[in-house]
Amino acid sequence: MENFDFYNKTKIVFGKDVENKAGEECRAIGSKVLLHYGGGSIKKSGLYDRVVKSLRDAGVDYVELAGVKPNPRLSLVKEGIQICRKENIDLILAVGGGSVIDSAKAIGVGVHYEGDVWDFYIGKVSPEKMLPLGVVLTIPAAGSEASPSSVISNEEVQLKKGLTNICLRPEFSLLNPELTYTLPDYQTACGITDMFAHVMERYFTTTKGVELSDRLCESVMKTVVHQAYRVLKDPSDYTARSEIMWAGTIAHNDMIGCGRSQDWSSHGIEHEISAIYDVAHGAGLAVVFPAWMKHVYKNNIGRFARFAHEVFNVDYDFEKPERTALEGIASLERFFKDIGMPVRLSEMDIDDRNIETMASKVTGNGTHTIGGFKELSKDDVKAILKLAL
Ligand code: NZQ
Ligand code: ZN
């Protein structure tokens, strides 16, 4: 096991009706909130009314900023920064999914910085603090409710970039599985794919002697597969929704990634796809991950065979473990298809014309490699994207 620091300050409040605690949780931090949300699903479901009532009952003043789009945009972040400064906002309350939370995080770090907030995302400077952030989560997926990361799209230059810093962890996150009943099946499946991918990015490691986190990863993946079928069969199954919601947080708060090298090349490649084509992050991952696996599995056939056996119950072929490994990749593709995800770029109407551009962008014009499990050059990325066509 490698040395590690693990610090997660996010208070999780989980269960039915917890959104009604938004007011009291905010009140413990400040008296004026930026209420940040997306395209209207929270108004349709009635969640907006309950959150606003909770804020009012707790005597918390609020200013609203709606309109966060999936793959959240830099322009709205800049608007939010201006509002926070003008209104002397004490904290941000993000009500929504990864896009709303990530937008709130960007606003929260931007408020304290004189320059362009995009500087943080291109690595020019590091943030030192963020406005306190509270979350009411409506889609289990990105894991941003407890992660130290934010991903923002700069629409002017078609770039989507991530920022990771310990100060980006929220103060509190309220997780009510019932709020996810209204999710369209496609969004549920995108979320399931994303959380599964967050575990795989950690599972495919080069670090030896990490039995505990290997087994934790396998447990989360097995649970997600099992509960995914249940939740899509009955979207109002509270038990299944609860398991999926908690799995989404566990998959990405990095508890299961401690002490091990991680990969993250599939995420890097997917971000290039969603930067250009604005596809849902989970759907992009369903296409990229199997292609990445086909390209790299020979680096450690034993690990891929173990994945197949432990997560998808494939019989372990001790004579030819490569067969087991390949069956595992096929099982993953079948799982993604079963839950309604695309597994090829063509299913998202994406052809080969931007492969060169995407491979170039993710590797800094070929000046650096990506990936911890296997270092990938620009040519490797091109090969993966071709496998995904
Ligand atoms: O905008 P509204 O109306 O709220 O609709 C949203 C949106 O259209 C809808 N939705 C959310 N909850 C709902 C609902 N519809 C009905 N009922 C509900 N309960 O779902 C759509 C997708 O929402 P979004 O927030 O975009 O989903 P997700 O949580 O998957 O977030 C994706 C973003 O997170 C980033 C991704 O790159 C992408 O930009 N990620 C952030 C990470 C992080 N901060 O740690 C890590 C991830 O790997 C990921 O990169
Ligand atoms: Zn992700």
Image (cartoon, rainbow, N blue to C red):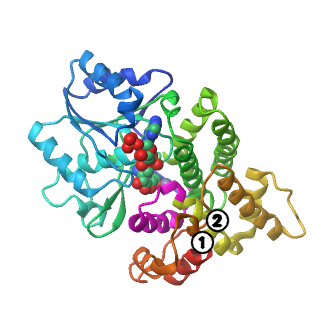
What is the CA distance from the residue labelled 2 to the residue labelled 1? 8 Å
Query: CB atoms at circles 2 and 1 under 8 Å apart?
Result: yes
Residue 135 x %, y %: 37, 35
User: Which region is colored magenta?
Assistant: 259-283
- Res 146 seen here: no
**Is 232 rendered above or below residue 239?**
below
Q: Give the crowd class for mark 1: few <14, some 14-19, many >=20 residues within 10 Å.
A: many
* Amino acid at the residue labelled 2: Pro
Farthest top residue?
A: 57
Q: Residue furthest left?
A: 86
Total marks shown come to 2
The C terminus: image quadrant = bottom right
Where is 276 relative to 380, above or below?
A: above
The residue indicated by pointer 1 is: 388
Residue labelled with disc 2: 290
Q: Can you tell which quarter of the image residue 244 is in?
A: top right
User: Under tag 2, what secondary structure?
Assistant: helix
